[in-house]
Image (cartoon, coloured by chain):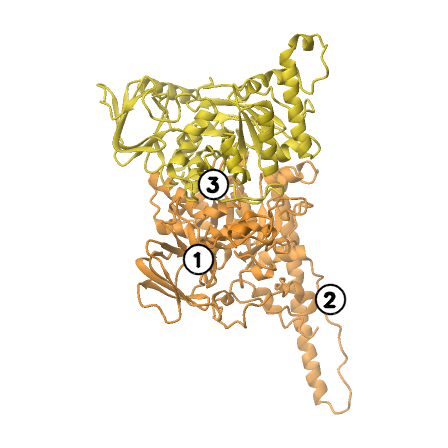
Chain colours: A yellow, B orange
Amino acid sequence: MRALLVVLAAARVASAEPIAIVGAKVCVKPGQVLDSASVVIDKGKIVGVNVATPAGARVIDGKGKFVTAGFIDGVSGVGLVGIDLEPSVVDGRFGPIDPVHEDPVHASYEARDGFDPRAVAVPVARGGGITAVVAAPLGGLVSGRSAAYALDGSATPLRAPTAMHVELGASGSGATGGSRGLGVQLLRELLDDARAFAKDRASYERNAKRRMIADRLDLDALQPVLRRQIPLVIEAEAEADIRAALRVAADYKLDIAIAGATEAWRLAPELAKAKVPVILDPTANLPANLAASDVNDEAAAVLAKAGVRVAISTLGSAGGARTLRQLAGNAVARGLTWDQAIAAMTTVPAALYGLKGRGTLEKGSVADVVVWSGDPLETTTAAEVVIIGGVVQSLESHQTRLFERYRVLPPR
Amino acid sequence: MRSVFASACLLLACGPRAVKVTVKPEDPKLDISPPWVDPETFWIRGAPPPARPLSDAVSDPNAPTIVIKNATIMTATGARYDGGMIVIEKGAIKYVGADAPAPAGATVVDGKGKFVTPGVIDAHSHIGVFSVPVGKGNGEGNEAIAPVTAQVRAEYGYWPQDPQVARALAGGVTAALILPGSANLVGGRGYTVVMKPARTAREAAFPGAPQTVKMACGENPKRTYGDKGVLQTRMHEYAAFRMAFAEAQVYAAKQAAYVKARTIWEQRRKRALELDAKRTDGKTVPGEPGPEPVPLDLRLETLAGVLRGDVLVQIHCYRADEMAQMIAIADEMGFRIRSFHHALEAYKIRDLLAAKGIAVNTWADWWGFKLEAYDGIMENAALLTDSKVRVTIHSDSAIGIQRLNQEAGKAMAAGNRAGIKIDENTALRWITANPASVLGIDSVTGTLEVGKRGDVVMWSASPFSVYARAELVIVGGRVAYEKQKGMQPSDYELGASSLDRRTR
């Protein structure tokens, strides 16, 4: 591992010079694609598109290539989940009830405490053109707080917390003996308590307050949600649960997003009106959930057409993060526009989680840039150069090393 | 008991048969004949009905004539016709090649700008057994009561109205091997199906497909039985495999001895009857009791079928060293492994797999979900193919099965990037001809050749493009899916989903 770190460090130093990607097809931002354009990067930022190549710049030939902003998975397991079935390397994945506190509320959980920047999935995702993730907890009623990380190996989050994550439906109701309505009530009670707690913290500390349903740190963690500093990302599949989420958001004046969102397409106008973004996996088209079985292959397109901001996500995967663009491509094959699909992996998650200056290649943006061998939504293309924060990244991983070892077999 | 041993030959005759086109009676016909056409019934009821011949798969006298003209036809044989034509008649492919006048009375489809391939075949699916909706009333994949449940069959659990069927079909899948799960060392028999919604499991059977059995090693059986105190380590897993097959060997030997004794008895009986016929004094040769039959043991019957070579062995196995263990056991016990499934580390022992002629079914890019899946690499399929191992890209997922064409494209591209040349024909074979071979149905499907079954897909673009959609899926010479009409909602979805309203 030490050797690898040295290599990475060397790569960073070597790439600190300005970079110019020239002659490429460049997606500056969703809706703006330029042919044979150049992208100039310096000091971690985008200097501009089609500006003069500075002297001493490292020039990357982009002929026949496609350049986009790096993709962002807005509900990711990268850094939290090492190996799904090995609990010692799984963080932020809760059952309906917390085994320690016998409590479905994990609001105080912070993904930044569980995130491992050296997790094996990090370089694999990076090799797939994912430059940032929002590492998000899952499970329980209130899963906890997510954190955004650049996938350049840095241990410092881009932003933390990025959101509070809540689960209605099966997970949330599992916490309340299977009643979805009680799950929503528990959430309301929690928000009430958090409000009351904030109003008079002193009496809480004196133990002079009525019993609160959550611990002090949980109530504290909910404050940025009540102040609308971070959104409440509500995992909900069934129309009924999404309607409940919209009511909670209206009653408590919260910024929310709906994740999972199997039946969200049925409420497209309502979601558009409430300006609630949706985070979904467009390939999840099985009527698997008895309570949310009205699946629609074209859900992403229906939502986008109605004016809902759609983010595409693997919804918590670690090893599968690199398939993000395939999910987007499939959405395009089912009615989403190419631009909307790019936005769903760049500008929409960046805006949703407050990742300022990310998601486009406009002048002054953070230089998270990927040079693709062709259309990034095609599964037969690949990320050839991945730049994060202006630094060309190593694409070496456990997998590339295995390939090198077994490219030629030892004699039998 | 007349025919008890008339069918001794059946013991040897249950493998795939040569194609001989026979005319099937009228259609449609709801087939509810018993599925257990192997020698099981032989022991209790005399000769079983003859196994349905594989040739049934290429004959459907009432099926229409369908022509796709002017398309790019990728046959998966290496031949490719730009602006080509295919004619499907009475369930089978009548013509494939350059454009020509369509036969009279045919339904003609304009294939301009379209791509035509054989139907996609998935060598590893749980559709119908791990059905949706997921509920307490569903979920037939794992009989996790004991590590060896060779007696159970995916067929018995197969729900032919699983909504996943229509979705797989819309992804261009025309046939699949439905397997029990991997909780058990021997999970039971697989079921090769035609990917069409049906009323009965039997109706969904791929006509004449050989029997298969699902085995699994490594983490899953350990995880399933570790806490139950039944089986905790790989040490026990491989011992348990050997013990099960040792038991099956004794069973098979008893069966063989019985057949032999019964044959002798039959000859003596026949001779006695002949002698009796010649006598005029009314006396007869005293009768002798026949040998005691071996009681039917469904569990051992499956394993004995493996030893006899009648049942194709499909093994879920991730690690290279474990595949080698299984090969050693197969060599010791005297059976052949048809293919390994998942096999993320197959690339490490591709020389051994090639030497043994064992196929590999794997994914394009799955890895890391458990320790034994830690060393998956995207070049697995390409490296194996390069070493002459037969490879398929399988799904093991009702989501993944809907885009196996893309998965093959990913694995192809990964190989080419790594300098291992994989052409489109090879990648297409990963999801057509090769899985057909793994299932033992390659003599009748998997490629576009004259005489083969009319399992055909017309794609809107190159099947390796993420934007390609299956627009027309023909199964056994009949149109089973048209994108324009949408997928057929399952019974479950009727009146309760917008899919029902959208497709009406």
- Kindly indicate the quadrant of the structure image that contains residue B118: bottom left
Vertical arrangement, residue B216 with respect to residue B210, above or below: above
Percent of width and height locating residue A64: 27, 36
Q: Which residue is mark 2?
A: B292
Is residue A278 something one can see in this rendering? no
Question: Of tags 2 and 1, which is closer to the observer?
Answer: 1
Q: State the residue position of label 1.
A: B446
Residue denoted by label 3: A302
Whether residue A212 is visible to the viewer of this picture, yes or no, is: yes
Query: Circle 3 — which element?
Result: helix
Q: Secondary structure at mark 2?
A: loop
Of A340 and B357, the residue lying toward us: A340
Q: Residues within 10 Å of mark 2 (few under 14, many from 20)?
A: few
| Letter of the chain that mark 1 sits on in the rendering | B
Residue closer to the observer: A80 or A283? A283
B448 over B350 or under it: above or below: below
Q: Secondary structure at mark 1?
A: loop
Instruction: Report the mark closest to the observer, 2 or 3.
Output: 3
- On the image, the x and y values in percent for residue A166 come to 59, 27
Q: Residue furthest bottom?
A: B280
Q: Are marks 2 and 1 on the same chain?
A: yes
Mark 2: amino acid: Glu
What's the residue type where badge 1 is placed? Answer: Gly
Q: CA distance from mark 2 to mark 3?
A: 69 Å
